[in-house]
Amino acid sequence: MRKHIESYSFVLLIILALVVVCGNAQTSDRPLYYEREITRADLAGRTLRELSLMRNTIYARAHNPFRKKWLNDYFSAQPWYRPEKRMDESKLSELDRKNAAIIVEYEVSLPRAELAEHEKALQAKKKAEGKLSTEDAIELSLLNQTLGESVEEAENNEEATPSLDPRILNSQLTLEQLSDYSRRDLRLLRNTVYARRGRVFKSKILQDYFKRKGWYKPDPKYTDTRLTDLDNRNIKIIMSLEEELGGPLTESEDKNWFVAA
């Protein structure tokens, strides 16, 4: 009887060991950084948060300082991360740049309906549990921002940003509200001011970005005369910060600006 028990225990230990090994293998098979070209299989099933971490890990390895709080918090907790005042462009290989572009291309190709379902599931989870984990809360915020919907909760949220709730642009922006915006974020926000008035964008990147927003209604008859004095003041403050950070990102200077950190 004792031998049977010992044999059973030994088998159980082997099974548990295999589970751990398989689990670790699965984790190592889907890292955040790849030293080979990324495939769609590497990206399938990833959340927006994970995709953002994958893309920004490329820049973190090049010592990029992150203005966005949740990214800064994540990478600051990594023992290998050494931020500098400015990113070291020489640390970015051609493969790194290509992989960053592949990640973005995959992200913008995600069906709106799929993202909406994920958003709905997280909202239901929050309602049922009362509070989301930090990771889920970030994911929900990214989904809200991408879809341009579900801003009811953001309206009474002291931490809401103009990107999450564009209605904030109905008031004068402050530099404090833009404290964690990167140059990429600032270009998108600046064009959000125009998008809210119906501007049709020449940039394919901006077309793809705004067409996913539930509130965006492009109007071929748009002119800048639709901008209010408040709109122009907000554009001015955004541009002032862009200049402070090195100047606005443009497609003429960097066609991959949307891939940037």
Image: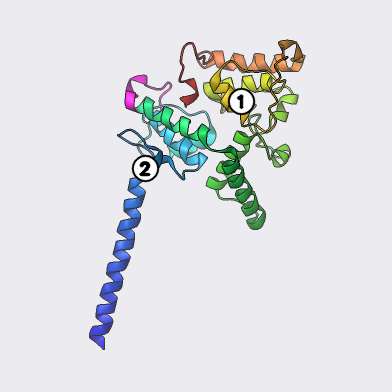
Q: Secondary structure at mark 1?
A: helix
Q: Residue furthest bottom?
A: 1
Q: Of residues 88 and 140, which is closer to you in this image?
A: 140
Q: Amino acid at mark 1?
A: Leu
> Earlier along the polypeptide chain: callout 1 or callout 2?
2
Q: CA distance from mark 1 to mark 2?
A: 31 Å
Q: Position of residue 232 (x, y in %)?
A: 71, 14
Q: Of residues 177 and 220, which is closer to you in this image?
A: 220
Q: Of residues 169 and 172, which is closer to you in this image?
A: 169
Q: Amino acid at mark 2?
A: Pro
Q: Secondary structure at mark 2?
A: loop
Quadrant of the snapshot with the N terminus: bottom left
Q: Residue at x 36, y 31 (%)?
A: 61
What residue is disc 1 on?
178
Chain part drawn in magenta: 83-95
What residue is disc 2 on?
31
Front of the two marks 1 and 2 = 2
